[in-house]
Amino acid sequence: MERTKKNLFQKAVSFLLVAALVFSTLVVGTQQTVSAADVSLKPSGGVVTISDENCSYLTQDYTWIKYKSKADGYLWLKFSSNSQVMPYVAGEVQLYDKNKNTYLSELIAYDTRSTTASETSECYGVKKNTVYYIRVNSVGGVKITAKFNKVNDKSGTKKSKALNLRKGKNTNGLITTANKKSHWYKFTTTKPSKFTFNITPYLTGPIDITLSGTGVKTNTFRLQTGLWGKKDGFSPTGKVRAGTYYVQIKPASKICNGYYKVSWK
């Protein structure tokens, strides 16, 4: 399932009646205008709570969350209900630059009913000492828990500097909003055998993965954002010759950022 704005549109009909109840409960009879305000996160993350009264549905405005990263890494966002009148809440979230003019990620929908991480979480790859704004469109009160994790990405920027992967061990890769270069990895088989290269993406856009080496035909696969948080594997058909194999991972769009895990076995 694609993690895009259309998700929310598909859910909007069921939410409309509930949201109208929120509106009548909180506003009708008071005629008070409530506007959303900008809030800030610490470099390590923190918690932002949006009340029913301050949700976007009522204010007709977004909540903007300011964030400045302390190092290269990823900011993980988790959405949960903060509503006093609705059984669950939904909305949209998107990363923007410091001027709130340019979006740096896809627009994705969250839904606190879901038990699937891809519908209750988002992950942004952020650059050290860079200011970002996170734009939240909320239907009902929501709690946003944010946590920053530093990543020391050791992948090579070209084939000759590819990072050697140890068999069976996960390695984290980072794609920040300021870095669209290729990430190179390699591994070596000592005898003819089958192998599988695995990747688990937590990314805001698609990536292209190219596998090459002595015993395989060079081939490129596109990994879409619908596989967010799900492990995917790429395997040559049958046994291949012993040798060194290379994997190139490259963002396929300007709004791709976040982190991923890679391994081979």
Image (cartoon, rainbow, N blue to C red):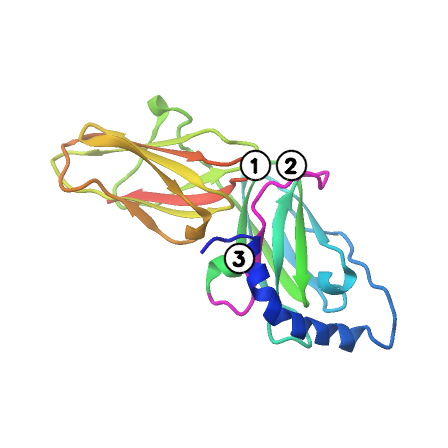
Figure quadrant of residue 220: top left
The amino acid on which the numbered mark 1 sits, given as a three-letter code, is Thr
* 102 is within the stretch colored magenta: yes
Separation of residues labelled 3 and 1 (CA atoms): 18 Å
Q: Which mark is residue 193?
A: none
| Earlier sequence position, callout 3 versus callout 2 | 3
* Front tag of 3 and 2: 3
Cβ atoms under marks 3 and 1 closer than 8 Å: no
Q: Magenta segment, which residues? A: 97-115
Residue lying at 61% horizontally and 68% vertically, measured from the top left? 13
Q: Which residue is mark 1?
A: 177
In the displayed structure, 164 sits above or below 115; it is above
| Residue beneath disc 3 | 121
Q: Which residue is mark 2?
A: 130
Any part of residue 80 in sight: no
**Cβ atoms under marks 2 and 1 closer than 8 Å:** yes
Determine whether the residue tagged by mark 2 lies in a helix, strand or loop. Answer: loop
Q: At label 2, which amino acid type do we have?
A: Thr
Query: Which element type, helix, strand or loop, lies under badge 3?
Result: strand
**Quarter of the C terminus within the rendering:** top left
Q: CA distance from mark 3 to mark 2?
A: 22 Å
Q: Quadrant of residue 88?
A: bottom right
> Quadrant where the N terminus lies?
bottom left
Give, as a three-letter code, the residue at label 3.
Ser
Q: Are marks 3 and 2 in contact (CB under 8 Å)?
A: no
Residue 253 in percent (x, y) is at 50, 36
Packing grade of label 2 (10 A; few <14, some 14-19, many >=20) is: some
Quick one: 237 or 195, which is closer to the camera?
Answer: 237
Q: Is residue 142 visible?
A: yes
Mark nearer the N terminus (2 vs 1): 2
